[in-house]
Structures are given as structure tokens and as C-alpha cells.
Image (cartoon, rainbow, N blue to C red):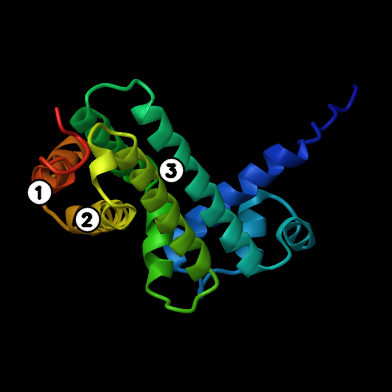
Amino acid sequence: MKTPTRRRVPRAEREQQMLEVAEAVFAERGYQATSMDEIATRVGVTKPMLYEYFGSKDGLLTACLARSRQQLHDKTMAAVSAGGEPRAIMLNAVRAFFEFVDDHAAAWAVLQSEAMLNAGPGAAEIEEIRRQQSDYTQALLGSMPGAAQVSPLALQVRAELVTGACERVAIWRSGQEAQVSAQQAADLVMAALWPGLGGETGPGVG
């Protein structure tokens, strides 16, 4: 009887498997309590292979966060690609953030646990995620009708307000007994912020 051959997993596919498992373990245990041995065992690889791919536990965490950053960016861009009137575009972008939190619960748990560490190994990458979202929001506001009347500094502040509000509302939402949907959360943020984001002297006029 012929022994079945074992399929060789392509490097890119294996890397994604490692990241998915690592993300889940980091979310369950937190960074400090997570061991490379457990991650390797769950993936079904040797610990040396894990180190070969990522160099260290710090490197693995950074790679997990970088993947989350790309996924969030892709989701946000897809959400606004259909266009529409300014408020609808911004609403779609905000809702995409809350949908990301729902669809990537483990990633969000990692982001929040590592955010508590001011100088942790993932601190720089977490700040880069915030910066990415703020920069994209600023560009989005800057592309809207009426934006020419607003200074770059004012646009930057408005983008920071959106980014900070979304993050805080997501944390608040996770502690609510009654479920607050992604759409409801987005509507609440927009109701609070849009009058200032899209008022008579800002983008969104018309």
C-alpha cells in the first residue's frame, strides 16, 4: 500500500497559520504569559521554525499587529470605495472600523491588551495603526467638498477626534450588556461628530 505524501505547505500559507494561532494565544493569555512553545505546538511546527520566520516573540507580536493594520486599512478602503455623499462616505468608514472589531475579535483583544503597555514590544506598531487610521481619515476629509476652506491643522485635529472616538466607543461597546451593533455604534459616533466635521466651514458642505 502506497504511503500518502504529506503536502508541503507554502511559506506564505504557513506564515498566515502561525499568525492566526499566535493572535489567538496572545488574545487568550496576554503577551507576557504566552510562550513560543505553545504557539508552535498549536500550529504543528517546531519552535525553531517559529523563530526562523519571526526571529523572536517580539517579532511575532509585531507581525500580528502589522497584519491587523493591513486588514483594517483594506476594510476601510473597501467600505468607502462605493463613494456617495460626504456624510455617507464617512459613516461607511466609521462602520468599517466597528465591523473590523467584530470580525477580528482576537486581533482587537491583542490591540487592547498591548495598548496597556506604554513601552511594550507592540507599542510602536499599535501607534502606527492609530496613525494610519488618522492619516486616512484626514485624507478622506480633505477630499470632501468645502475642505479647501479648512486648514490642514484643523483637518488633522478632526481626524484625530474621529480615530480616538472610534477606539473609545469600541471599548465602551464591548462592556455593554445590551448588544450595540456596528451600525448603531457608527451612527452614534457620526451623530456626535459630524456637525463639527461637516459643518458650514468644513468638508461635507452640500
Taking 64 as reference, is 137 left or right? Answer: left
Quarter of the rendering containing residue 94: top left
How far apart, in angstroms, are the residues tagged by discs 1 and 2?
9 Å
- Contact, mark 1 vs mark 2 (Cβ under 8 Å): yes
- What numbered label is drawn on residue 32? none
Q: Nearer the viewer, mark 3 or mark 1?
A: 1
Q: Which residue is mark 3?
A: 72
> Where residue 113 sits: x, y (%)?
39, 67
Q: Which residue is mark 1?
A: 192
- What numbered label is drawn on residue 165? 2
- Kindly identify the amino acid type of the residue bearing the numbered disc 3: Leu
How far apart, in angstroms, are the residues tagged by discs 3 and 1?
23 Å
Residue nearest the viewer, comparing 169 with 180: 169
Residue nearest the viewer, comparing 177 with 172: 172
- Kindly identify the amino acid type of the residue bearing the numbered disc 2: Ala
> Where residue 51 sits: x, y (%)?
75, 62
